[in-house]
Image: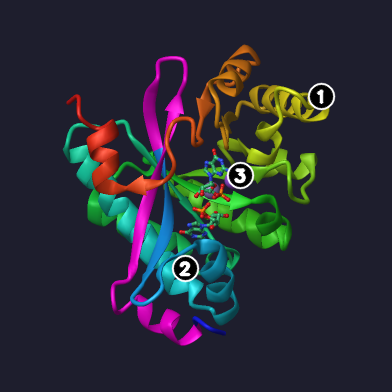
């Protein structure tokens, strides 16, 4: 309630910004992608974390125009980075449930790809298991429309939600992102280690990419490599950072 009125005005007042978290291939220490994460620069309160305002935006329906803004901002930013010469870089964008279930998502995606000339497979859209399982028929039809455009679909926070392996096989997805709660104690907790192993093996057997989230130490990274998972994201490499900082820290050698 505290932020509701301010949230209504935040879009027109240009108070949102995107941070980008690097996605690294640990085999060659290469940046292969970034995940866009929204931040709200509240005029009086400073940065309000998404955990606070995303649920509010979902309740009020504001998440749809906000999500639309995120999609466009992220893809236009990717175009700039491709123009700098980093033409392989991919962009991952989180979708909310309301945005995913809205009829014209694929039109918005198609339009921004046309405006920027970004190759569709350079755009990854992140969904959670719960978002997909809410209404599986609608989810499959929406995912197929997005897949027809050529964009990639990633399952975010994988392993924490309610999902079924038989459905997983029928969804046109490209990547599983292992939730960071499994990575946190991976060196010491047998169960987390077994679960992570299982997800990696299953992903490979299904022809899916797998990204480990929440990697915070070199020991976790080395362990994941020993289990055949080389794609990673986490504070060990970088927290989410502004575009300029991503450029100065990661996009300098071209
Ligand atoms: O960046 P941070 O860890 O503070 O994000 C917290 C939560 O907010 C995460 O679950 C993340 O998925 C969600 N989030 C961040 N940016 C976006 C966005 O652009 N759209 C949606 N729907 N969720 C986001
Ligand atoms: O739910 P989603 O995976 O979209 O949330 C992404 C958020 O997770 C990021 O915005 C960031 O705030 C958080 N995050 C990213 N890397 C790490 C990490 O290594 N450790 C922790 N604790 N959080 C992380
Ligand atoms: Mn995500
Ligand atoms: Na996640």
Label 2 or label 3, whichever comes before in sequence order: 2
Q: Position of 82 compared to 162: left or right?
A: left
Residue bearing mark 2: 104
Answer with the quadrant where ligand 4 appears in the image. top right
Classify mark 2: helix, strand or loop.
Answer: loop
- Queried on whether the Cβ of the residue with tag 1 lies below 8 angstroms from ligand 2, the answer reads no
Residue bearing mark 1: 190
Whole-percent x, y for residue 112 in the image = 31, 58
Q: Which mark is residue 155?
A: 3
Q: Nearer the viewer, residue 128 or 191?
A: 191
Q: Position of 206 compared to 77: left or right?
A: right
Classify mark 3: helix, strand or loop.
Answer: strand
Q: Quadrant of the C terminus?
A: top left
Which of pointers 2 and 3 indicates the residue nearer the eye?
A: 3
Q: Are marks 2 and 1 in contact (CB under 8 Å)?
A: no
Q: Quadrant of the N terminus?
A: bottom right
């Amino acid at each position: 309630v505290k932020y509701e009125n301010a949230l209504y005005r935040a879009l027109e007042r240009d108070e949102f910004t995107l941070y980008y978290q690097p996605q690294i291939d640990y085999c060659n220490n290469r940046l292969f992608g970034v995940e866009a994460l929204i931040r709200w620069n509240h005029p009086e309160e400073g940065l309000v974390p998404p955990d606070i305002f995303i649920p509010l935006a979902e309740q009020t329906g504001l998440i749809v125009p906000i999500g639309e803004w995120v999609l466009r901002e992220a893809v236009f930013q990717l175009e700039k980075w491709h123009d700098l010469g980093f033409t392989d870089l991919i962009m991952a964008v989180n979708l909310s449930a309301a945005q995913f279930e809205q009829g014209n998502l694929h039109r918005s995606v198609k339009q921004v790809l046309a405006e920027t000339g970004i190759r569709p497979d350079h755009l990854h859209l992140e969904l959670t298991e719960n978002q997909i399982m809410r209404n599986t028929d609608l989810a499959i039809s929406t995912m197929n429309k997005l897949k027809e455009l050529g964009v990639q679909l990633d399952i975010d926070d994988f392993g924490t939600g309610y999902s079924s392996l038989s459905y997983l096989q029928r969804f046109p997805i490209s990547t599983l992102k292992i939730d960071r709660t499994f990575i946190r104690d991976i060196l010491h907790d047998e169960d987390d280690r077994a679960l992570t192993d299982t997800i990696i093996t299953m992903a490979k057997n299904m022809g899916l990419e797998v990204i480990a989230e929440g990697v915070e130490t070199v020991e976790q990274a080395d362990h994941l490599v020993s289990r055949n998972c080389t794609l990673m994201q986490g504070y060990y490499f970088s927290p989410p950072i502004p575009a300029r900082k991503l450029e100065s820290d990661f996009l300098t050698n071209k």
